[in-house]
Image: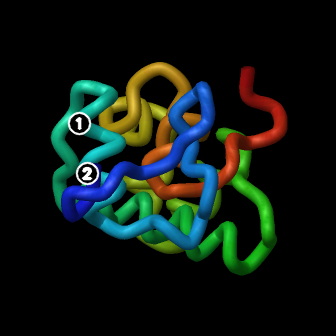
Amino acid sequence: MVDNRPVAVDREGFLLDLQCWSEDAAAALAEQEGITLTPAHLEVLLVLRDFYHTYQLSPAMRPLVKYVGQQLGKEKGTSLYLLSLFPGSPAKFAAKLAGLPKPDNCL
């Protein structure tokens, strides 16, 4: 729920309408996953959304790490940093919270 309205998601929790994304929607999706968004999470989500708007795809892990490093600095462009924010599969989890489609190579 965002602003007392349900947010439509698929069976895996990805937004059905990418235009419905907002920081509030991201916070609601994160809460359903058991995490609270921090400014560090939002920083990565905004970079991920920029990647999507530039390339029209959700990146797999390697391109995500590289792009985050280019945009936010090499200390944040590491798999370990992204895993600390988005446990499990950072590319898939971050794409979900960023309101983007699931990356093609994620199970």
Give the residue type at disc 2: Ala
Farthest residue, direction bottom? 54
Q: In the displayed structure, does residue 30 sit left or right of residue 46?
A: left
Residue at 73 percent of width and 79 percent of height: 54
Give the residue type at disc 1: Glu
Q: Is residue 38 above or below residue 88?
A: below
Q: Position of residue 2 (x, y in %)?
A: 27, 58
Q: Is residue 53 above or below residue 106?
A: below
Q: Which residue is mark 1?
A: 31
Residue at 66 percent of width and 40 percent of height: 61
Mark yes or no: residue 62 visible. no
Q: Is residue 81 above or below residue 70?
A: above
Cα distance in 3D space between marks 1 and 2 = 6 Å
Asked if the residues shown at circle 1 and circle 2 are in contact, with their CB atoms under 8 angstroms apart, the answer is yes
Residue at 48 percent of width and 67 percent of height: 20
Q: Which residue is mark 2?
A: 27
